Image (spheres, rainbow, N blue to C red):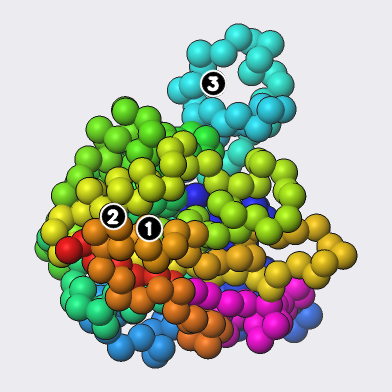
Amino acid sequence: MNRAFPGTIIVLAAAQLAMAGPAQAGPTSAPTEPSGLAAVRAEARAVAGLVTSELAKSYLAAADDLPSPTPRKIYRDAARKYYAAAQREGLSAEERETLTEIDVDEQLYYMTKYGTPLAYVRPFELLGHAGVREAEGLRILDFGYGGIGPLRLLAGLGADAVGVDVDPFLPALYSLPEDQGPVANSGGKSGRVTLVDGRWPKDAVARKAVGGGFDLIVSKNTLKNGYLHPERPVDKRMLLDLGVSEEAFVGALYEALKPGGVLMIYNICPAPAPPDKPYVPWADGRCPFPRKMLEAAGFTILKFDEDDSVEVRRMARAFGWDRGEGGMDLEKDLFAHYTLLRRS
């Protein structure tokens, strides 16, 4: 459930990437932008000058080792249920005829519906300056992962990277054996990717598959105050159902960490909707859990609802989110907050 702005089902803007040079077809050709892996690598170069921690630098450098996925197709029915090719074969002929076919290329594989995996560079930059020097050897959980890109980058750095999500799109998208398991990079580091479908920690199967002993838990654009505590009535489908009480959820996060392990909640948000417009729950990116609840679970609070808007706007400019048709007004419509906790 890693979202650019969750609930929008868009990539932030077509101008999310730095513009490439004019196409070579002729003088009247419009400028072109890279896509897929070329886009990810262009973004890594564009934002590289903004990071100083070794963790963030290595995260960006790992983009060069990302592999091109095997082309595939997935399928969607009228109820927006998704099927991998193998699952489609189990349907009746009549059911198969109703499906919409979706070609999966590098762009969809790495960007999914929510944008660049390199937006994780901000939380990793902050973690790098908080003492997390490298990913190699770490066991890392991404709660609400939303796309394989960050997990694959971390595994390429030698991490045991686990992602859990409830979006039914993801198990259909990442259904081939190559999507999980051991990962090795050109520098000889070896990590692993594990993808878990289910409501953690409520579902016993998901809880067992995720396991514990994590050095780091990251949740980006999922654990937002607006999703759990909307200030106005809103369709429940736009909210986050933890499946357990907030106290039990916070306790599960604590127990999943090793002693000394850290939890990063990082949220990028648009501006709140004015009173005469429909409420936007994903615009409230504050930590949804009170200080007292976090401390009662045993966490040491290192940062709580820290404003990172200035830095996330610098990142957005490097990515080009403010350029082109539909470009954002970054000063008025882009904000970020983060909370950083350590298990005692």
**Which residue does the numbered mark 3 point to in the structure image?**
88
Residue at screen point 66% across, 15% down:
95
Q: Is residue 162 magenta?
A: no
Quick check: 196 above or below 288?
Answer: above
Q: CA distance from mark 1 to mark 2?
A: 6 Å
Residue at screen point 69% across, 28% down:
79
- Residue type at mark 2 is Ala
Between marks 3 and 2 in the image, the one whose residue lies nearer the viewer: 2
Residue at screen point 20% across, 45% down:
212
- Please report the bounds of the magenta region as a residue range: 314-337
- Residue type at mark 1 is Met
Residue 326 vs residue 294, the one in the foreground:
294
Dot 3 and dot 1 residues touching (CB under 8 Å): no
**Which residue does the numbered mark 1 point to in the structure image?**
293
Decide if residue 192 is in sight here: no
**Which residue does the numbered mark 2 point to in the structure image?**
297
Between marks 3 and 1 in the image, the one whose residue lies nearer the viewer: 1
Quick one: SS at disc 1?
helix
**Place of residue 56 in the rendered image (x, y in percent of width and height, measured from the top left):** 31, 77
**Place of residue 293 in the rendered image (x, y in percent of width and height, measured from the top left):** 37, 58
Q: How many marks?
A: 3
Quick one: SS at disc 3?
helix
